[in-house]
Amino acid sequence: MDMHDILKSEPLAGPAHRPISISEVGLPQTVLEELALKTLYLSGPFSVLDLSEHMRLSLEVASELLRRLRTEQLCQVTGLSGNIPNLSITSQGRARAQELLAQNQYMGSAPVPLGSYVDQVRKQSVGKLEVHPEDVKHAFAHLVIDDKTLWQLGTALNSGAAIFLHGPSGVGKTTIAETLSRVLAEDEVWIPYAVEIDGQIITVYDPTLHKRVPESEPAGRDQRWVRCRRPSVLVGGELTIEMLDLQFNPTTKFYSGPMQMKANNGILIIDDFGRQRIRPDELLNRWVVPLDRRIDFLTLAGGRKIEIPFEMLVVFASNIDPNQLMDVAFLRRIQTKILIGAATEEQFCEVFRRVAADRGLECDPCIPKELISFIKNVLKEELRACYPRDIVNQICWAAKYEAKEPVLDQAAVMRAVDAYFLPKAQ
């Protein structure tokens, strides 16, 4: 049995069932009527089938909404396409739609209730996954990592709790963090287009972050949900305290979920931790409760706080000593601390060989050994996993400039070294 078989779960009951009545949709009727009227105003005239597709609701629900809007004289039937009514908005409906758009310009899929979102995220918790040694070895096969570190990474994945990767710059912490997401990505989860709470809309599904798997979506599903790989969200130095809360657009007047909401049921990587625009202690103070209790509190524009799940694997990666970044209480909340250190000579040679092979270059085993000797004895540097890639890149760039085929020889390597490393102070 491979990793995909171990991790993959069946589609869950809620999103797999398509509501066929307004009561089954789970939203206030007014929310649906207002969304339908705005849709008809901006995208119509069209048929009731088009309305159902725009709102990602069943034809039965769309027909029920049509009856409501007609009763209030906000729309009218202009004919039939087969037995499907064609709709157009009335002058009264147009005036009402303009009022609604001034309050909220959200368009598209009908949202799901906040309660349904919370229940679904809990069902899909990363803490319920089981990862085994063969899974981790398969995911990390493209990297050169010792067995001890692989064991620590696998154990951390099974914890579902926060991980701190620390060590010198250039040893592969970010690459390792991103590879952890490949293990989780073997599984699939449901993510809603948007969530509704007291008439407020929060968008969640983000096609730039969420990788949809349409072939896993059953035909009778609730189309307000999207079947995706477990998400992976990476943020670096651009992180601010404002990014941790709901993002309200004053023009459209609806919200976008913060990064941790979009990372729910997946992995959230805080890269270069300690170098963000938010201080480390400020970030950790903000996440004391989420890291401990797996719940987060977000604030709506009026000041009301809502509770959402904090169900993700958080990975902090930094080249700063953890003891300089946080106190003992915070270190305790980050359950696993893994040191990613300098490469051994054997690892360095293997990385160099793989990088050269990826570039289609022949590599004399003496070349990386001579490079190791120069780095350690002349430059007095540690061996870092990024050096082989960066040196080979320098060689290929120089060959491209000279309109030649790149060659891995001592002269080319030393010229690359001269361009890459800073000279030592005399």
Image (cartoon, helix red, strand yellow):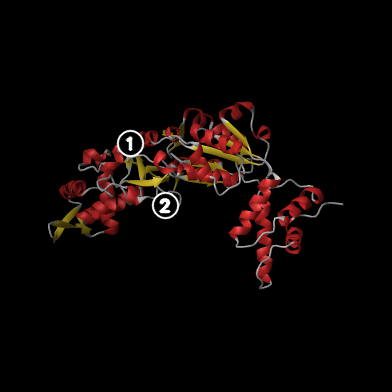
Q: Is residue 244 visible?
A: no
Q: Secondary structure at mark 2?
A: loop
CA neighbours of label 1 inside 10 A, class few (<14), some (14 to 19), many (20+): some
At x 23%, y 60%, the residue is 45
The residue carrying mark 1 is 116
Q: Is residue 424 visible?
A: yes
At x 39%, y 33%, the residue is 122
Q: Secondary structure at mark 1?
A: helix
- Which amino acid type is marked by label 1? Ser
- The image shows residue 373 at horizontal and vertical percentages of 77, 51
- Which amino acid type is marked by label 2? Pro
The residue carrying mark 2 is 207
At x 12%, y 57%, the residue is 83
Q: Residue furthest right?
A: 426
Q: Give the quadrant of residue 240.
A: top right
- The image shows residue 395 at horizontal and vertical percentages of 68, 63
Foreground residue, 296 or 94? 296
